[in-house]
Image: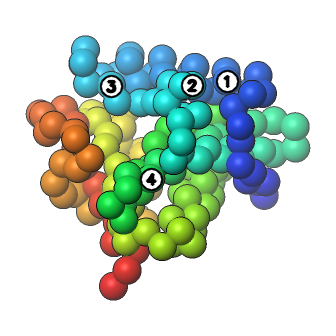
Amino acid sequence: MFEIREDDLSGEPTRRLLALHLAGMHANSPPGSVYALDLSGLTAPGVTVWSAWQGDAIAGIGALKLLGDGTGEVKSMRTHPDHLRQGVAAALLEHIIGAARARGLARLSLETGTGPAFEPALALYRRRGFVNGEAFGGYQASSFNQFLHLALRV
């Protein structure tokens, strides 16, 4: 089982995983199509980051960005390579969904890419009930990106 805790991004393991995440986004996305938050973006007001740990090892990260209109955005979901296919991302996503509900949000949304590198994450989001929909929060739709949404209130 993983321990999920709020993360202030000051620890070296978290920073290394964030750097790996950003490098992966740039390697698998066309120029100008990466909307992943860097360290300054993840420490901005309205953004909460959680990390999942297995003992002393970081297993993954994920974040919730409040958009101010009753919507939250899932950001920076990344599983450490040593912990792939062990349920880390699912545990973090459930935690983020729970936090969004606790904050009274009506919807969770996310922007992601298209292609093989994004398929595992897309499968996770769709299994959890996210559906494709319109651009949100200032994003511009393109042939590369896609937008998924999860209604939190019925």
Q: CA distance from mark 3 to mark 1?
A: 18 Å
Closer-to-camera residue (106/92): 106
Tell me the number on the disc at residue 106: none
Q: CA distance from mark 4 to mark 3?
A: 19 Å
Q: Earlier in the sequence, mark 4 or mark 1?
A: 1
Mark 4 — residue?
A: 66
Q: On screen, 103 above or below 31?
A: below
For the view shown, which residue lies furthest in the right direction? 55
Mark 1 — residue?
A: 15
Mark 2 — residue?
A: 39
Q: Earlier in the sequence, mark 4 or mark 2?
A: 2
Mark 3 — residue?
A: 34
- Residue at 41 percent across and 24 percent down: it is 25
Q: On screen, 71 above or below 53?
A: below
Closer-to-camera residue (82/23): 23
The image quadrant of residue 13 is top right
Q: Do the residues under discs 1 and 2 have CB atoms within 8 angstroms? A: yes
Q: Do the residues under discs 3 and 1 have CB atoms within 8 angstroms? A: no
Tag 1 secondary structure? helix
- Number of other residues with Cα within 10 Å of mark 3, as a class: few under 14, some 14 to 19, many 20 or more: some
Residue 86 seen: yes
**Left or right of 87 in this view: 22:** left
Tag 3 secondary structure? loop
- Residue at 48 percent across and 17 percent down: it is 23
